[in-house]
Structure formats: C-alpha cells, structure tokens
Amino acid sequence: MGNYLIMVTAHPARQEFVSYLKEQIPDLIVVMDQDSNAMHTYLRALEMTGQNPCVILEDDVELTGNFCAKLDAAISERPDRVIQFFSMRKADIEIGSRWDTGSRFMMNQCTYFPAGYAAALRAFRETWDKREVQWRSGKDLLVAAFLKSRRERYWIHVPSLVQHRVTRSIIDRRRSMFRRSLTFQEE
C-alpha cells in the first residue's frame, strides 16, 4: 500500500461496517465517535494524521474490488492534490474523472489529503465562520471552505471507489438512504 494512512471515522453502532472495512484494509485506523458528534470525530482523525498524507473514509461505505490497488494507482498520479473517490454527480457519467472548484466539494465518503493537508485543514477549522462551526456534521462544507480559501481545485476520480450503503444516516435521519454513486463498480 502507498505511503499514506487510511482512517475511518466511525460510530459505535456501526461496528459491523467497521469490521468489514478492517477485513479489506488491515492497516485501517479506526477513529471512533465518542460523543455522537461527527465533526468532533473528523477533527480527531485530522489531528491523528498530523503531517502525513491520508485517506479518510466514512463508516457507511462499501469498497470496490481491489480497493487498495486502485487507490494506490489513483493517488500515485496526483499525490499532491486532494482527490475525492465518491461522487453522485451527473458529470461523472457525462465527463468522467475531472477537476472541480474547491468550493463545490461535497460528500466525504472517501477523500485523499496530501502531506500537510490534514493539519492545515484542522487549523483552518479554528478560523472557520462561526455560523458554520455550529454544525455537528458539515465535514464536506469544511473541506469546501478550506479549498476555497486556498483557491484550490480537487480531483474527482471516476469510477467511484466506494459506494454509500443504503442505510439510515446517524447524523440526520431525514437524509435519503439512497445517496449512491452512479459509477461505482463492485469488481
């Protein structure tokens, strides 16, 4: 596997999902939610990463076949850029892999951050607009604001290497259970 950490932010109620991910990614680092606050868990993952490059997964994903090999190949092409490995946009089918404006970042199911980015993102959180800081979730909004502040684009990798499970959101039960990638391939 590449020279980066792979972490999952997880909720205790989803231990079955975490076990599945650990089977597929033996070196997976689990960052367990301690206070039913997804943002706090995400910030702990960023802190644990330090200056290392990392991939941060959410616990409610399924992985494509040969996930680690595909992840390595994609990261090796752009090791110094933020890469998103899950998307649900129409352009995924119409255009495929592409650059997008940082302010449009959404969906944090599986994201690669180059060396130094986790620490910079964690530090940015302290300066983030206080109206947005109140969110218990909003991790993708944080990443979007961070990339926008740096005037950076990010790479959307198609096909998606993870699929969002059909399951209720722990953060907000009103969210659709069918937030699915149109390009995910199991094998």
Image (spheres, helix red, strand yellow):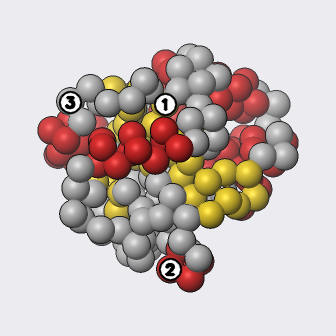
Q: Which residue is mark 1?
A: 54
Q: Secondary structure at mark 3?
A: loop
Expressed as whole percent of the image width and height from the top left, the position of residue 155 reads 61, 54
Marks 2 and 1, the one that precedes in the sequence:
1
Q: Amino acid at mark 2?
A: Ile
Residue depicted at 33% across the width and 26% down the height: 29
Expressed as whole percent of the image width and height from the top left, the position of residue 109 reads 45, 52
Which of the two residues, 22 or 36, is positioned nearer the viewer here? Answer: 22
Quarter-wise, where is residue 30 in the image?
A: top left
Residue 93 is marked as 2
Q: Is residue 165 left or right of residue 140?
A: left
Expressed as whole percent of the image width and height from the top left, the position of residue 48 reads 49, 18
Other-residue count near label 2 (Cα within 10 Å), few / some / many at <14 / 14–19 / ≥20: few
Between the residue at mark 2 and the residue at mark 1, the CA separation in whole angstroms equals 27 Å
Quarter-wise, where is residue 114 in the image?
A: top right
* Rendered-image quadrant of the C terminus: bottom left
Other-residue count near label 1 (Cα within 10 Å), few / some / many at <14 / 14–19 / ≥20: many
Which of the two residues, 40 or 140, is positioned nearer the viewer here? Answer: 140
Q: Which residue is mark 3?
A: 26
Between the residue at mark 2 and the residue at mark 3, the CA separation in whole angstroms equals 32 Å
Is residue 133 something that shows in the picture? yes
Other-residue count near label 3 (Cα within 10 Å), few / some / many at <14 / 14–19 / ≥20: few
Q: Amino acid at mark 3?
A: Pro
Marks 3 and 1, the one that precedes in the sequence:
3
